[in-house]
Amino acid sequence: MKRILTALLALLFLSAPFSDAEKRTYVIGFYNLENLFDTYHDDGKNDYEYLPDGANQWTEAKYRKKLRNMAHVIAEMKKDNGRWHTVLGVSEIENRHVLEDLVMESEIAEANYQIVHYDGPDRRGVDVALLYKPDQMTLVESESIPFDFNSSKIRFDMTKEDMDYFRTRDILMVHGIIDGEHFAFYVCHLPSRLGGKGQDLRARGGEIIYEHSMKMMKKYPGIKCVVMGDMNDNPTDESMAVYLRGREKLSQVGPEDYFSPFLSMLKAGYGSLAYRGEWNIYDCILVNYALAHPDKGTFQIMPIIKKKKHKYYGRIFSKPFMTNQSGQYKDTPFRTFSNGAFVGGYSDHYPTYIVISK
């Protein structure tokens, strides 16, 4: 019932697509592409399930279907918004090659997306990356920030041996300029909840991002910082609320805080993925003080959904074609595999995005 209410609210209260007159309005989003692997083995990557003779019998036809599906979602978001994403962070991608194939798909090729990607150390073989429109953002620099255990605040539930063996996704930082303003985008896929563990690891992930972004703000006064990713945590969890200092309301955001627009949406019943009958928003986007309380004439985060006296500053993009319409998983994201069988869906996550304007 909560999910149905969520869908109705989205349909009823979404603002109209942006008009052509709004030349300085930009869309920034994130999408977990759910295991976008090619059909070839990469040395050092555990991609054996995603080979033609692997457990998933991952053929070229299935791979091409997956690419078309991902491109279709991106194109549908453009149709809704009247414009392409300026920046789209992605996760669960095997390598740069799959993104090169994706951005050349016919439905999105005109966007001319460029790619920022680093091969990471994750043992499962998945990375994060960033797609951006070069006519809207100029790339200044990028960095792949490794996970470490160098925290003075967090007590880790791991032995030294386990820490030495542990590998997870790096955090991607992309520094660019949009319409004369500096931006730092952080794209992450924080450690898994598998086995009910990893709270300390996700907290450390949030801490690493926070510490790096504070340095960027000091180096580039007024820089706009956006943190996005599959956090494997809700906006209410420690990694987001404590270590990234994510605040629910704009009025609560101080110079060293982040505004967490999906926190109030989670409380209102929205969700980007479902697990064991419960809805969560792991696909978070947060913005720093400079975007929450901008200087006059500079970019600010804008409300997207309006309901009576409430404004929501994020959107979870879901359409019927992306959603199971019947069966055990009715009204949840229509994914690529279900119970081990290829069903030709999209992703187990819905994409999320924010809008900035000046």
Image (spheres, rainbow, N blue to C red):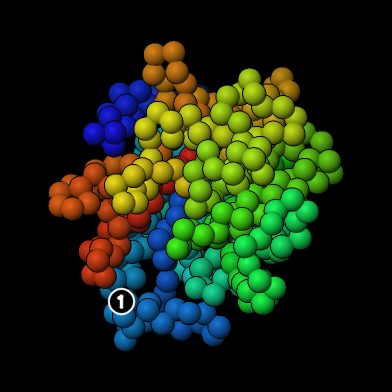
**Label 1's element?**
loop
| Quarter of the figure with the N terminus | top left
Q: Which residue is mark 1?
A: 56
Q: Nearer the viewer, residue 89 or 236?
A: 236
Residue 244 screen position, x and y as percent: 65, 42
Residue 203 screen position, x and y as percent: 63, 51
| Quarter of the figure with the C terminus | top right
Residue 179 screen position, x and y as percent: 67, 36
Q: In this picture, is 341 found above or below 252?
A: below
Q: Nearer the viewer, residue 198 or 93?
A: 198
Kind of residue indicated by mark 1 = Asn
- The residue lying at 33 percent from left, 68 percent from top is 64
Q: Nearer the viewer, residue 4 or 61?
A: 4
- The residue lying at 69 percent from left, 33 percent from top is 257
- The residue lying at 74 percent from left, 38 percent from top is 223
Does residue 264 appear left or right of residue 278 in this picture? right
- The residue lying at 29 percent from left, 42 percent from top is 319
- In this view, the residue farthest toward the right is 219
Tell me if residue 20 can be seen. no
Q: In this picture, is 126 found above or below 209?
A: below
Q: In this picture, is 51 found above or below 231?
A: below
